[in-house]
Structure formats: C-alpha cells, structure tokens
Amino acid sequence: MSLHVHIATLENRHSALESEIAAAKTKPAMDDAQIRELKRRKLQLKDELERLRNS
C-alpha cells in the first residue's frame, strides 16, 4: 500500500470516528467511557496521520 493510499485510509477512518462520536453524544445509552474510547482512537489516528505526513 502506498503512503498516499494509507494516509487517505486513515483520514477516512478519522472522519468516520468523528461522525460516530457526534452520534454517540446524542444517544443516552452511550456512556462517557465509550465516548472517551472513541476520542482516544480518533486522537491516535490524528497522531499517526501527522507522523506520516511529516516523514
């Protein structure tokens, strides 16, 4: 997989997590721990994207 394709894939996953977090905030069944986990995964993707873009 080329670097460009990998970055695009990570960007898509990051965007999907952002949407999932927004939807989770509107659902009373989602607890704070689940939302924190989604945010943690989103931040990991962001860090990975920045690392790849800077390398």
Image: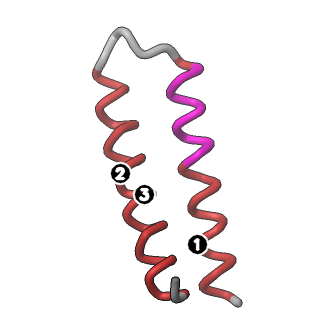
Q: Is residue 23 left or right of residue 50?
A: left
What colouring does the structure picture have?
A: secondary structure
Query: Which residues fall within the magenta stretch?
Result: 33-41
* Badge 2 density bin: few <14, some 14–19, many ≥20, Cα 10 Å: few
Q: Is residue 26 left or right of residue 44?
A: left
* CB atoms of marks 3 and 1 within 8 Å: no
* The furthest residue to the top: 29
Residue marked by disc 3:
13
Residue 29 image point, x, y percent: 37, 9
- Closest to the camera, between mark 3 and mark 1, is 3
Answer above or below: position of 6 versus 46: below
* Badge 3 density bin: few <14, some 14–19, many ≥20, Cα 10 Å: some
Mark 2 or 1 closer to N-term? 2
Look at label 2 and name its amino acid: Ala
Residue marked by disc 1:
49
Cα–Cα span, label 3 and label 1: 11 Å
Residue 15 image point, x, y percent: 37, 57
Mark 3 or 1 closer to N-term? 3
Cα–Cα span, label 2 and label 1: 15 Å
Q: Residue at x 50, y 77 (%)?
A: 6
Quadrant location of residue 8? Answer: bottom left
Q: Report helix, strand or loop for mark 3.
A: helix
Answer above or below: position of 18 versus 11: above
* The furthest residue to the front: 1
Residue 9 image point, x, y percent: 43, 69
Q: Which mark is residue 16?
A: 2
